Image: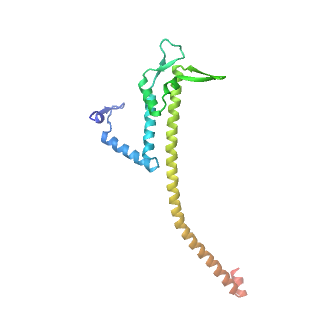
Amino acid sequence: MHVLSAPMDTPGGQTARLPTPKHCVAQFSKLCAAMCTVGVRPESQVALFELLAAILHLCDVRFVPVPGGTADASEPDDAAPLERAAKLLCVPTLSTDLTSRTISTGRDLLAVPMSATEAASARDAVVKSIYCAIFGLLVTRVNETATSLSSAAHAAADQKAGVQKKDKAKSLRRQHVEGLEEEDNATPADRKSVV
């Protein structure tokens, strides 16, 4: 815990302090509360955090050519982060999925190895897809919450204004009816002065 609050030099030559564990816990609690506010249940929050953790582990994966293999074959330089990501994503075949592609040749399926560059591109595509799905979900939840709150506020304002509008409309109708009654009772001389 002492290391987390130790001073740290920044590129500008200034000293910055990392947040304390207490501060991190408080901020995390605020994040969880905000997610509850927009309708993300605690069990869904756990799933989101697992997906984010999987992204972080996938970003730690580097692919290298298979020693003694063809130039197109690759493997992770360290299997541990890929195994953690696979477990978090519940995809036990993730390593194979990122290092080879399946080609259909008529009735047969053929596994073709991917180069380190292709495997890294596949990893990046998976990371982007997961991140976009998470971001899209959160934006949708925030928008739905904002819309429902806005609709509720507008409904309350409209209800209040609607009462006033009805009263004003009754008042205008009353004035119009009274004006017609006065016109019917007016003498021909009065009617000329009104027109």
Quadrant location of the C terminus in the rendered image: bottom right
Please state the horizontal and vertical placement of residue 3, each as a whole percent of the image: 28, 33
195 up-or-down from 80: above or below: below
Residue 54, image x and y in percent? 45, 33
Q: Residue at x 43, y 34 (%)?
A: 53
Q: Is residue 102 left or right of residue 59?
A: right
Q: Position of residue 35 (x, y in %)?
A: 44, 46
Outermost residue on the front side: it is: 107
Number of labels in the image equals 0
Quarter occupied by the N terminus: top left
The image quarter in which residue 190 lies: bottom right
Identify the residue at image location x=42%, y=29%.
84
- Colour pattern of the rendering: rainbow
Q: Is residue 116 above or below residue 161?
A: above
Q: Nearer the viewer, residue 176 or 66?
A: 66
Residue 17 sits above or below residue 95 on the image: below
- For this view, does 145 lie left or right of residue 181? left
Residue sitting at the far top: 68
In the depicted structure, whether residue 160 falls above or below residue 91 = below
Looking at the rendering, which quadrant does residue 167 occupy? bottom right
Which percent across, then down, holds residue 174?
Answer: 61, 78
State the image quarter where residue 111 is shown.
top right
Q: Nearer the viewer, residue 132 or 50?
A: 50
